[in-house]
C-alpha cells in the first residue's frame, strides 16, 4: 500500500509540475484575466477535468505559480552571507538574479504584471514575509556600511536597484532585442550584460 501511495504521490507531483509550467506560459502571454483553464489544460496536454482535480480554480493555479516564482527568486537572496565579503556577496546575488531572469523571463513577466495590477494575489506576502526578509538583509548591508566595508548607501534602494536592473532583461526582453538584435543572439550576451551591470553597481558600493 505504501509503495502504491508513494507512486501516486510522485505522479501527482509530476502532473502538478506540468500544469504549473503550462500555466506560466499562458499567464505570461495573456495575463491572469486573459487566460483560461482550457488554455492551460491544452498547453499541459491533459483534459480540463483532470486539471481541475489538481487545481479547482484558475486562481489556485495563478497563486501557486506566483508562490513558486517568489520561492525561486528569494532563495539566493536568503543565502546572502553576513560574514562574507560584501562586494562578493552582492556580485554573486546579482549574477544569480541575472541568470534567473535569462532562464525564466516568463516568471518575471507574470510577477511584474501582478505588481502592476496592485498585487491582489500576493499583497499579504509582500507586506509580511517579503518585508521581513528585506528588513533582515537591509540590516546586513547597514552593518557592512558601519564596518567600512561598503560605501554609505540606502540599503533598501540598493536592493530595489538590483531587482529593477536584473529583471529589466526579462520584463523588457522585446525592447532589448529590438535595440540590440545581433548582440542578443550571441551566447555570451547575458555575461556581457551582467558584467556591465556589475561594473556600475559594485563600483558604486565599494568603500571609498
Image (tube, rainbow, N blue to C red):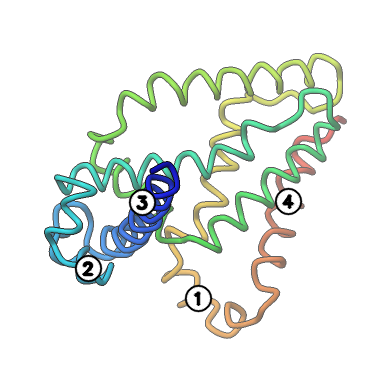
Q: Tell me how many marks there are.
A: 4
Question: Which disc, if any, is residue 46?
Answer: 2
Which one is earlier in the sequence, the residue at label 1 or at label 4?
A: 1
Horizontally, residue 15 falls left or right of residue 98, namely left
In the rendered view of the protein, which quadrant contains the N terminus? Answer: top left
x and y, in percent, of residue 166 in the image: 57, 51
205 shown above or below 98: above
Label 1 to label 4, Cα distance in Å? 21 Å
Helix or strand or loop: what does disc 2 sit on?
loop
Q: Secondary structure at mark 1?
A: helix
Compute the Cα span from label 2 to label 4: 44 Å
Foreground residue among 55 and 145: 55
First of labels 2, 3 by sequence position: 3
Among the two numbered marks 4 and 3 on one chain, the one whose residue lies closer to the N terminus:
3
Q: Secondary structure at mark 3?
A: helix
Question: Which dot, 4 or 3, sits closer to the camera?
Answer: 3
In three-dimensional space, the C-alpha distance between marks 4 and 3, rounded to whole angstroms, equals: 46 Å
> In this figure, which residue is indicated by the disc labeled 3?
8
Residue 179: give its label: 1
Image location (x, y in percent) of residue 193: 66, 63
Q: Secondary structure at mark 4?
A: helix
Label 1–label 4 contact, CB within 8 A: no
Name the one closer to the observer, 119 or 36. Answer: 36
- Give the labeled residue for mark 4: 198
Mark 4 packing: few (<14 Cα in 10 Å), some, or many (20+)?
Answer: some
User: Where's residue 202, x and y in %?
Assistant: 77, 43
Amino acid at each position: 500500500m505504501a509503495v502504491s501511495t508513494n507512486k501516486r504521490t510522485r505522479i501527482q507531483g509530476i502532473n502538478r509540475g506540468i500544469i504549473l509550467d503550462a500555466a506560466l506560459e499562458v499567464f505570461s502571454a495573456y495575463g491572469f484575466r486573459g487566460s483560461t483553464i482550457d488554455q492551460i489544460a491544452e498547453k499541459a496536454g491533459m483534459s480540463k477535468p483532470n486539471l481541475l482535480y489538481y487545481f479547482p480554480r484558475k486562481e489556485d493555479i495563478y497563486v501557486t505559480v506566483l508562490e513558486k516564482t517568489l520561492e525561486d527568486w528569494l532563495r539566493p537572496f536568503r543565502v546572502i552571507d553576513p560574514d562574507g565579503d560584501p562586494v562578493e556577496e552582492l556580485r554573486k546575488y546579482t549574477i544569480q538574479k541575472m541568470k534567473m531572469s535569462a532562464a525564466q523571463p516568463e516568471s518575471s513577466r507574470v510577477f511584474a504584471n501582478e505588481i502592476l495590477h496592485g498585487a491582489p494575489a500576493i499583497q499579504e506576502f509582500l507586506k509580511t514575509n517579503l518585508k521581513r526578509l528585506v528588513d533582515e538583509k537591509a540590516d546586513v548591508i547597514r552593518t557592512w556600511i558601519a564596518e567600512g566595508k561598503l560605501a554609505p548607501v540606502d540599503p533598501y534602494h540598493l536592493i530595489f536597484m538590483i531587482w529593477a536592473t536584473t529583471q529589466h532583461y526579462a520584463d523588457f526582453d522585446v525592447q532589448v532585442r529590438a535595440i540590440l538584435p545581433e548582440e542578443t543572439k550571441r551566447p555570451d550576451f547575458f555575461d556581457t550584460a551582467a558584467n556591465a551591470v556589475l561594473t556600475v553597481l559594485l563600483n558604486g558600493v565599494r568603500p571609498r
